[in-house]
Image: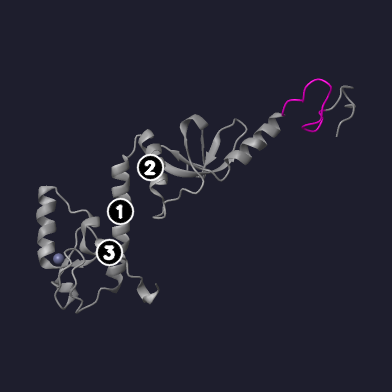
Amino acid sequence: MPGKNAFTGKQNALPAGQKTGRKERKMTYREYNEAQRKKWIGKKVMYDGAVYNVVDVDYNGALMIDKSAKFTDTTAVSISMIQVIEEDQTMSRDWTPEELQAASAAMKEAGEMSYEEFTAEIAEQEAKQKIEAFAKVQADGDHFCPRCGRMTVKDRKVTNAWSRHANVYICDACGTDEAMRDFAGVVLPLKDWAIAKLPLIPLGGRA
Ligand SMILES: [Zn+2]
């Protein structure tokens, strides 16, 4: 509260916004730090090609991000070293094209993937999820080949080919095709698998 400081005899600092007759007093460093913390804590930032959460702002103005360092769970990074990821942009398939574009630009800036590579990566992740969901329920007598989409998988699933690119059984023809493609260095992306192109049928019958 305003009043004389007992030691210096000077007027103590006034609460923010209160006029002193001259100008409003300047923010104390403590208040500045508080404001910075309010601004930054909880924000997602891109640093060194990956996304982290800001957990604190230290007294040097550096952002503490949840990147594990040698002795701590956080890493201090300067604001100039990061890119801010806007609030509701999270790694999910619900991103709008605009959001993807923005995130892609940030990644590109950070020397990471291009937009095309990024969207291909998202599609690849989605395909992987579908294949894994299928693999969980793949059973003997299940003839559908998740890779080519034909009914070419043999009765006993373990007698079929085990994919080199996903943890699932595929038909022998696909097994051979994978081997040839690996040899030639032209791997078929998971997103081009038959199952990736099917609408995702939720397990347990939920719509
Ligand atoms: Zn196949």
Give the quadrant of residue 197. Answer: bottom left
Q: Which residues are magenta?
A: 13-27
Label 2 residue SS: helix
Quarter of the picture holding the N terminus: top right
Query: Residue at point 63% right, 41% down?
Result: 38
Considering only vertical position in the picture, is 17 above or below 168? above
For mark 1, what is the residue?
Answer: 123
Q: Residues within 10 Å of mark 2 (few under 14, many from 20)?
A: some
One can see residue 78 in this view: no
Q: Is mark 2 within 8 Å of ligand 1?
A: no
One can see residue 85 in this view: yes
For mark 2, what is the residue?
Answer: 101
Residue in the foreground of this view, choosing between 65 and 87: 87
In magenta stretch: residue 172: no
Image position, residue 77 (x, y; %): 50, 34
In magenta stretch: residue 20: yes
In-image side of 56 versus 102 (left or right): right
Q: Residues within 10 Å of mark 1 (few under 14, many from 20)?
A: some
Give the Cα separation between the discs numbered 3 and 2: 27 Å
Q: Are marks 3 and 2 in contact (CB under 8 Å)?
A: no
Instruction: Return the mark for residue 131.
Output: 3
Residue type at mark 2? Gln
Label 1 residue SS: helix
